[in-house]
Image: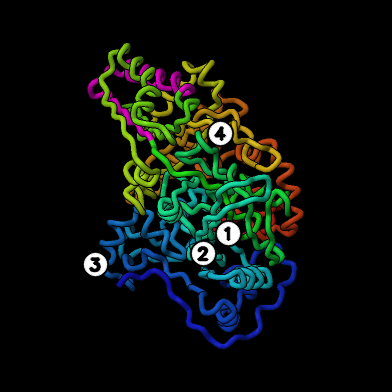
């Protein structure tokens, strides 16, 4: 029997916990202030029996609840997002799971809650959200917001926390829209809608929506609120550049509309100012675009049949041709290490196979001139859904594994590639030579930039490549090895890439969670304005996320307890 969560049965209501005095720390399990069983039962009644007490997903692999068959299943699925996204507590970033209860630790090792949330409310209505916020505020308990647990930076979990789990807010409605400076097709999606949900609905309705390259990522949470790049970004921009309005429950439990015309400051902050920090988004309305043919291209080469120096010359040639590729309307996902390079894939909205071949031709000719052995392919799909299913699928879960890497990231300016490509390549060679995989997203979102309505990191406007830099994660290696790799990222890899891209920044959703100067690197010149908006809408810092705007006022100890910073 698969053990995931324990649903607490509905019981008679009693008064919610009274407001706690001004403590410098959030109330933590074991503290005298921690709510009694009756108070938790009261919350459960107020949310229609939807309170879930966390039982870690990996518990069948540990005594005294060991189940060999179930444990084997968990081990086989642990690196798939599917098993985590339907849990109210499991998270996909192993660093933040902290080995407290994963299926790869010894059966005899204790299964503890560690950094997992203590409780979650499976919200289905706005009143569920309001009642959960009130309970957390009145009892001085840390609150987190979660949909799928995809967050690489630990923003959707926290020791001793109560979670608002938005996963089942799945409404999708395409509509004609005429407000907030936009007239056209739009779609309103619930906070629990994931990429594969809107892909299927859009395919049926004949429209496409900007969403991530991993189909299990939720759209309305940290993805859009952090910016949100997409295979469609060269055609339509980032997700945060396509929003029309949000329905949000704020720290004072009020439900508000945030748009260009209503609460425009909150709307601005939600468009790129970071997830989990401004309020609980109930729904989001974004632009929708006609579905059409999609062109695709793939290409790869390896050191196994190419000289090492020539191999790197091929990658340098790719970067030199990339500006023209994205300017022609394509978005390019590519990977390389010190042994292979792969485009997987180039996506071109409303373009034919022949047009893709023309887009890639200058790069192919450059490889021919270098004498590089490569494989190349061109393709065309009749719909975005079919293209996505082939190259980012199979749907619904997709082909991106979780729990396999630790992350750093950098936005590479177009100017760096155009005018300093050789120096960038020398840096890239050094980085991949240290065991790092470079995952690049080549795109141009500058035409969609609007600083009046978007808090998107300004560096995106000058960006040609978002480079995600990864080191491998092992569930069976000593924790000290993983710590060493994390230190490598923070102390050596990131300074190298920053040195060749001065004044740029990092895409906060795919970055080093220990990034120094996160205020500048994740938010840039927007930080001061964002902080003033945070103080207006959440003056007591009720919403908190790691490296979020205003997070400096809090400190989280090694035991997970959250206290006001000195």
Q: Nearer the viewer, mark 3 or mark 1?
A: 1
Magenta region: 295-324
The residue under label 4 is: 445
Q: For the residue carrying disc 2, how many other residues have a C-alpha within 10 Å: few (<14), some (14-19), or many (20+)?
A: many
Using the rendered view, name the quadrant where residue 35 is placed.
Answer: bottom right
The circle on residue 126 is none
Give how far apart the Cα atoms at labels 3 and 1 are.
39 Å
Q: For the residue carrying disc 1, how many other residues have a C-alpha within 10 Å: few (<14), some (14-19), or many (20+)?
A: many
- The secondary element bearing badge 2 is classed as loop
The answer to whether mark 3 and mark 4 are in CB contact below 8 A is: no
The residue under label 1 is: 283
Give how far apart the Cα atoms at labels 1 and 4 are.
24 Å
The residue under label 3 is: 69
Q: Nearer the viewer, residue 291 or 416?
A: 291
The residue under label 2 is: 169
Q: Which of marks 2 and 4 is nearer the N terminus?
A: 2
Q: Which of marks 3 and 4 is nearer the N terminus?
A: 3
Give how far apart the Cα atoms at labels 2 and 1 are.
8 Å
- The secondary element bearing badge 3 is classed as helix
Q: Which of marks 1 and 4 is nearer the N terminus?
A: 1
Q: Which of marks 3 and 1 is nearer the N terminus?
A: 3
The answer to whether mark 2 and mark 1 are in CB contact below 8 A is: yes
């Amino acid at each position: 029997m698969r053990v995931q969560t324990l649903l607490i049965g509905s019981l008679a209501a009693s008064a919610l916990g009274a407001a706690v005095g001004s403590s410098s720390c959030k109330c933590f399990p074991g503290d005298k202030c921690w709510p009694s069983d009756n108070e938790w039962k009261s919350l459960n009644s107020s949310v229609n029996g939807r309170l879930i007490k966390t039982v870690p997903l990996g518990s069948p692999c540990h005594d005294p609840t060991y189940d060999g068959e179930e444990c084997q299943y968990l081990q086989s699925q642990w690196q798939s997002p599917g098993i985590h996204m339907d849990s109210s507590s499991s998270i996909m970033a192993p660093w933040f799971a902290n080995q407290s209860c994963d299926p790869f630790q010894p059966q005899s090792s204790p299964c503890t809650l560690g950094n997992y949330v203590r409780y979650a409310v499976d919200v289905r209505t706005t009143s569920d959200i309001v009642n959960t916020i009130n309970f957390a505020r009145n009892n001085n308990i840390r609150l987190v917001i979660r949909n799928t647990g995809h967050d690489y930076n630990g923003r959707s979990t926290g020791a001793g926390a109560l979670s608002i789990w938005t996963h089942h807010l799945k409404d999708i409605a395409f509509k004609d829209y005429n407000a907030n400076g936009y007239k056209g097709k739009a779609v309103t999606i619930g906070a629990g809608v994931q990429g594969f949900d809107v892909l299927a609905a859009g395919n049926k309705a004949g429209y496409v929506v900007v969403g991530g390259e991993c189909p299990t990522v939720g759209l309305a949470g940290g993805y859009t609120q952090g910016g949100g790049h997409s295979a469609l970004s060269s055609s339509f921009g980032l997700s945060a550049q396509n929003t029309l309005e949000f329905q949000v429950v704020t720290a004072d439990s009020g439900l508000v509309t945030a748009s260009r015309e209503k609460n425009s400051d909150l709307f601005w902050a939600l468009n790129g100012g970071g997830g989990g920090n401004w309020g609980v988004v109930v729904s989001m309305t974004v632009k929708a675009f006609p579905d059409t043919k999609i062109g695709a291209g793939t290409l790869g080469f390896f050191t196994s049949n190419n000289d090492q120096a020539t191999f790197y010359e091929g990658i340098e040639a790719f970067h030199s041709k990339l500006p023209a590729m994205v300017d022609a309307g394509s978005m390019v996902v590519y990977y390389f290490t010190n042994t292979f390079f792969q485009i997987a894939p180039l996506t071109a909205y409303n373009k034919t196979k022949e047009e893709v071949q023309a887009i890639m031709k200058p790069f192919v000719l450059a490889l021919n001139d270098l004498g590089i052995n490569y494989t190349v392919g061109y393709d065309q799909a009749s719909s975005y859904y079919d293209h996505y299913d082939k190259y980012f699928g199979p749907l619904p879960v997709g082909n991106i594994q979780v729990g396999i890497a630790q992350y750093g990231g950098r936005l590479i300016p177009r100017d760096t590639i155009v005018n300093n490509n050789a120096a960038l390549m020398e840096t890239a060679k050094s980085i991949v030579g240290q065991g790092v995989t470079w995952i690049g997203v080549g795109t141009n979102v500058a035409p969609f930039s609007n600083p009046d309505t978007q808090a998107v990191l300004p560096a995106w406007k000058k960006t040609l490549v978002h480079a995600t830099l990864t080191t491998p994660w092992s569930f069976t290696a000593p924790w000290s090895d993983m710590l060493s790799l994390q230190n490598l990222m923070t102390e050596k890899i990131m300074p190298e890439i920053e040195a060749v891209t001065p004044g740029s920044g990092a895409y906060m959703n795919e970055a080093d969670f220990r990034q120094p100067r996160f205020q500048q690197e994740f938010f840039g010149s927007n930080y001061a304005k964002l902080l003033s908006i945070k103080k207006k809408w959440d003056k007591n810092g009720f919403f908190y996320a790691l490296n979020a705007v205003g997070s400096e006022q809090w400190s989280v100890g090694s035991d997970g307890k959250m206290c006001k910073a000195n």
